[in-house]
Amino acid sequence: MSTPVAQWVPGMQMTAGRLQYMLERLSESLTVTAYGAVGIGTVDDAPAVQAVLNAAKIRGGWVIVPPGTYLLATLPLRIYRNTRLTLLPGARFVRGAAETMLINGDAAQNLGGYTGHGNITIEGGVWDCQGTAPGLTASAMCISIGHARDITIRDVEIRDVSGYHAIELNSTKRGTIENCRFLGYYDPGARDFSEAVQLDLAKSSGVFGGFGPYDHTPCEDILISGCYFGASGTSLTAAWPRGIGSHSATITKYHRRVRVSDCTFEGVTQYAVSAYNWEDVAVTGCNFSGCGSGVRFRTVILTDTEDTKRSDGTQTGASQAMRNLTVTGCTFRSGGGYDEPIVTLGETSGQILNLTIGDNAIDGSTAGQNGIRLQQVQRFAISGNTISSVDGTAVSMENADNGAVTGNQIYTPGSHGITAVTCTHMSMTGNQVLYPGGNGVLVQDGNNIHIRDSYIKSPGRSANNTYYGIRLSSTASSISLSGNKVRPNGSGNEAINGFSATNTCSLIARYGNDWRGSEFTGGALDDKSPSPQTLATDLA
């Protein structure tokens, strides 16, 4: 007898074992039409759908929704553990009440941690929330999940949500959202920060209104893959403010092991991915087009007095570090002016640790936004990125220590190529900066920095006699430069010097560099630092 299979494929040889398996699966299924749903779009089918979900609660099972339009006017629907809800192709759920469409469990339950209703699959169909329809514009969820483990949501299209989220995973462990489409959002007022997919923790009824307990359980082991975020075209709606993210936190708690892969974000007005108080995060292979900002990593905001509390309510007055974050293999095109395509923001009391930004392509930003910005970051690598036509600086770093900026290709930034402000213990190696509007490389303050094997062409293109190829200023100290090459443009606006260091800099060592260019307005080299070391010999 052949091994049973979970899915019939046309042309597969029919055997007794496979037929038996298929009959067993059919016997487990519960069809909503058998419980009275009619799917004509004018009759409230929610009671029939709920009856099927209640039947599945007793024994577990597979709930099937045939093609049709199902008006849901008695909400929310409640789904329970060990249930698979499948909307077949051509099936459409239409929200008909100002409530969440689907939630996992009952309002009165008190199942803490990850012990609530889990092992649930929700798949297929169009979920139309009608967020602009009369009587339905108040904020509401589409799918809300809490205190659960083993949740899979796939192949669904969620349209025109008002105010809240298409999918909320709250206090969820092992959650997967794949191949879904999130189209259209309506802001009923003061909700310009909502995420299509929100990861949240069971902090309070104001954060998660479905049920308690409010034990601050976060999300862990989350995969969001192959999804699309954009506009629906419905009048009065737009693309989502944020694609995936969080906007609440508790000190000592983190959302951990979150993967966002192969997703497309188009026209998202704020952050496509906003990883707020997440750890062990990978954003890979995603495409961002026309978004206000791409990826943000953010530690707990110090001025948010709710988020700086512990779970017992104690006010810490501090942020907390978050670590192990990567953005790799992504493309960012036509970035908007809300924030940078990639921005990582820590606090003095909560820095970002162990950051990798590599092999991304960034093409364009507006309103002075940089390409990549780091603030209060420790232990980082920015490598192999191609950054072109950003309105601000290509790579901007402030209070970023113990890092490497390596092998990046930078073309026509509106401002500087690379800036390091109050940074320490860092190397910049093998970067190419072409036609920057400002300086090629700018170092202000900071110490113990190595700048090596850079090629900078045509610095200072935005204003004549204003900028430099490589510039050290303020109290920059213990800076070594070797193997760098700077060349003027040859016509039009030119930099003052190929290399410049102010007299407030100290312990400058340089050798084997090529600053030549008669077109520099102040000469190729202007090192005013006291006693710079210029011999290619060991320093001891």
Image: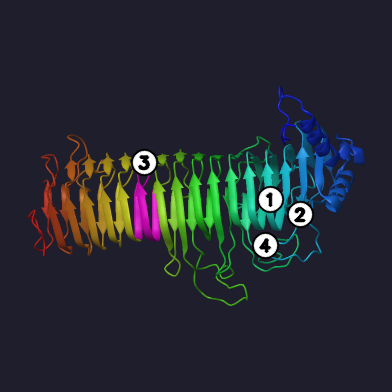
Disc nearest the viewer among 4 and 2: 2
Q: Earlier in the sequence, mark 1 or mark 4?
A: 1
Q: Earlier in the sequence, mark 3 or mark 2?
A: 2
Q: Which residues are magenta?
A: 372-399
Q: Residues within 10 Å of mark 2 (few under 14, many from 20)?
A: many
Disc nearest the viewer among 3 and 1: 1
Alpha carbons under labels 2 and 1: distance apart: 10 Å
In this picture, residue 185 sits left or right of residue 410: right
Alpha carbons under labels 3 and 2: distance apart: 44 Å
Q: What residue did someone put label 1 on? A: 151
In the picture, the disc for residue 207 is 4
In the picture, the disc for residue 387 is 3
Q: Are marks 2 and 1 in contact (CB under 8 Å)?
A: yes
In this picture, residue 374 sits left or right of residue 125: left
Q: Residues within 10 Å of mark 4 (few under 14, many from 20)?
A: some
In this picture, residue 49 sits left or right of residue 249: right
Q: Residue at x 30, y 61 (%)?
A: 423
Q: Earlier in the sequence, mark 4 or mark 3?
A: 4
Of 218 and 100, the residue lying toward us: 218
In the picture, the disc for residue 104 is 2
